[in-house]
Amino acid sequence: MQSSDRLNIETPEQIALELPLAGIGSRFLALVLDSLLQVVAFLGLLLVIYLFREAFSFISYIPDVLGSVLMIVVPFCIYWGYFAFFEIIWQGQSPGKRVAGIRVIKQTGRPMTAIEAIGRNLMRAIDILPGTYAVGLICMICNKQNKRLGDYVAGTVVVHDKSIETVHPDWGLGTAGLARHPEMRKLSPEDLVLVETYLSRRYELELTVRESTAHQIVAMILQKAGIEKTPGQSDDDFLEEVARQLRDTASFR
């Protein structure tokens, strides 16, 4: 079950991961920053045309119909293309979203595809109505995950993003609770991703959620690998050792 500010994702291993949903304030900040950058880009384009107006003198020979089409297509590409372009190459982030520390992901927790990014942003034509994002705002207020129409079309949500570099997990380098078990090779690369995702985001979770998540992941690893945890070793220390050992094996490099 999902709360109003959290996205609960259940992995194929039946492990529940919890991500903090971005609120209206964070998304509005990102939109303001992106809009300012778009205005700068549009003004920059006009400045280039003005400075090199003689080189663009051929425009006067373009038929009126084609000229009208260009006047529609160019702003369209700057506005909608801007969001789709950056969210594709930056995996769900535009410059404004990056500054605000938020990211668009699929409902399943996976990155969205290029087609989904394009479809999501085409819906801005409706979300922006009547010119103040009123439709999008009302839609976000009326659902627990702060989703606008574009998110419903693409099956996406916006979450707070914190890179692994900024988390700085406090992994105990001196722990030696887990011996070198050849049985660890039974674990898959997906298991390693699951463990490292938990370790990198554990300090963002509430204590009870963190302990429950760690316990579930440990139980899954013990069952799959057929090993036992050292008596007295904490779940976090165990998972740190598991991640370190998997990283040290050639098959995970």
Image (tube, helix red, strand yellow):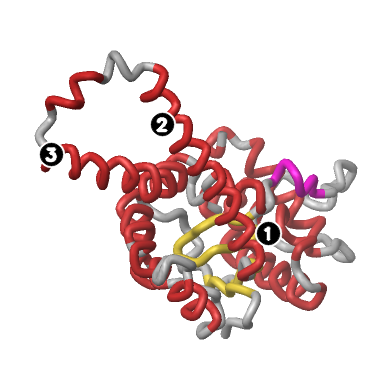
State the mark number for residue 64: 3
Q: Is residue 21 magenta?
A: no
Question: Marks 3 and 1, how far apart in space?
Answer: 59 Å
**Helix, strand, or loop for circle 2?**
helix
Where 28 sits versus 76, above or below?
Answer: below
Viewer-proximal residue among 52 and 212? 52
x, y percentage for residue 60?
A: 18, 26
The residue segment tinted magenta is 164-169
Residue 212 seen anywhere in this rendered image of the structure: yes
Please report whichever mark, 2 or 1, sits nearer to the chain's N-terminal start. 2
Kindly report which numbered mark, 3 or 1, lies closer to the viewer in this rendering: 3
Viewer-proximal residue among 188 and 165? 165
Residue depicted at x 51% and y 83%: 143
x, y percentage for residue 205?
A: 75, 68
Please report whichever mark, 2 or 3, sits nearer to the chain's N-terminal start. 2
State the mark number for residue 198: 1
Tell me which corner region of the image, top left, top right, bottom left or bottom right, holds residue 70: top left
Q: Which residue is mark 2?
A: 46
